[in-house]
Amino acid sequence: MNKELMQKFSLGEQLCFDEISPGFPVIKVNNHYATATISLYGGQLLEYKPHDQSEPVIWLSRKAVFMQNKAIRGGIPLCWPWFGDYNSQSVDATLPAHGFARIVYWDIKSTQTLKEGGTEVILKMPCDDVCLQYKKVMNHFNCQLLLKITITDVLKLELISINHSQQEVPISNALHSYFNISNIRNVNIQGLEKTTFHDKLNGEKSSFDEAVLKFDRETDRVFVDTHSDIVLTDPDFGRKIIISKENSSSTVIWNPWQEKSTSMSDMSNDAWLQMVCIEPANVSKNQLLLAPGEMHSISLTITVNQIL
Ligand code: BG6
């Protein structure tokens, strides 16, 4: 581990550095409230567990693969500046799904101990070098990307895009959060009632009128024009997880179910039972168009409440 990094950014016992796999440095936080692991590859929070929880809140695949150009399965990958496949007239099959922010190394901008023992970490994507690789599809693209992670009695992630170019820039983004659950069949989600979603499995648009969303099959839905908090209720883990979002107009819900999960080399065969993705996003018709000089900040706050 780079000694300079340690000297510059470690915060005593509260924040230190490690490697999760050779060549994959991580920041380890252990503060008054929680433990967390943040990977510099992908600027990706990988683990989060408040001290009063016996089970992690964020799910990280036991079979996650740590390899260049491959996204780490689990945690909170950042989808940016596009979501899903790159969408253009001249589709280039070599472009990575969900953009490139999750497959490049990020720099640390700052770390600090907050009042009452919380921790703040700010990461910065080295955009100049990275965007050059994608120049052919991203003419005039000159955007800065920052991630602010705050670990207090809640976990907050803020993804900040700043358009430094002279042109408008289209940006999609998602905080692709994998939640650790007791069993996909026994959890439910509230906060999406009376919305419209695009079902990625059959390409259809539907309205969602139920009070709760439950799971009994593969689910891959993009809910648009949604701004409310989402509540993930998990009676077997005795908790409700509140997912609050700001400046996010879409919410993506994903569980691959058994067949797809089994076909994925970085998920164990029963992994689909233990995870669900709830992703605050701006995608599809909610894609952003950043004016020259404009800044946009999407944020996610995760609060864990015991069920009494
Ligand atoms: C979800 C998408 O956000 O991410 C799914 O809606 C996709 O379609 C899933 O399968 C996982 O994507 P990836 O690229 O990490 O395997």
Image (cartoon, helix red, strand yellow):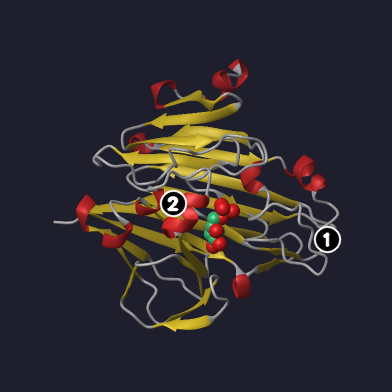
Name the residue nearer the viewer: 130 or 169: 130
Q: Position of residue 307 (x, y in %)?
A: 18, 56
Residue under the point 81% across and 70% down: 89
In-front residue for pair 295/211: 211
Screen quadrant of the C terminus:
bottom left
- The residue that label 1 is drawn on is 166
Query: Label 2: few (<14), some or many (≥20) within 10 Å?
Result: many
Give the vertical position of 254 relative to 73 (above or below).
below
Quarter where residue 141 is shown:
bottom right
Residue on which the image places disc 2: 178
**Residue lying at 83% horizontally and 65% vertically, measured from the top left:** 90
Q: In the rendered structure, which amino acid carries the disc numbered 2?
A: Tyr
User: Residue 111 in the image: x percent, y percent?
Assistant: 52, 33
Q: Position of residue 128 (x, y in %)?
A: 78, 43
User: In the picture provided, is 138 more to the left or to the right than 187?
Assistant: right
Name the element at disc 2.
strand
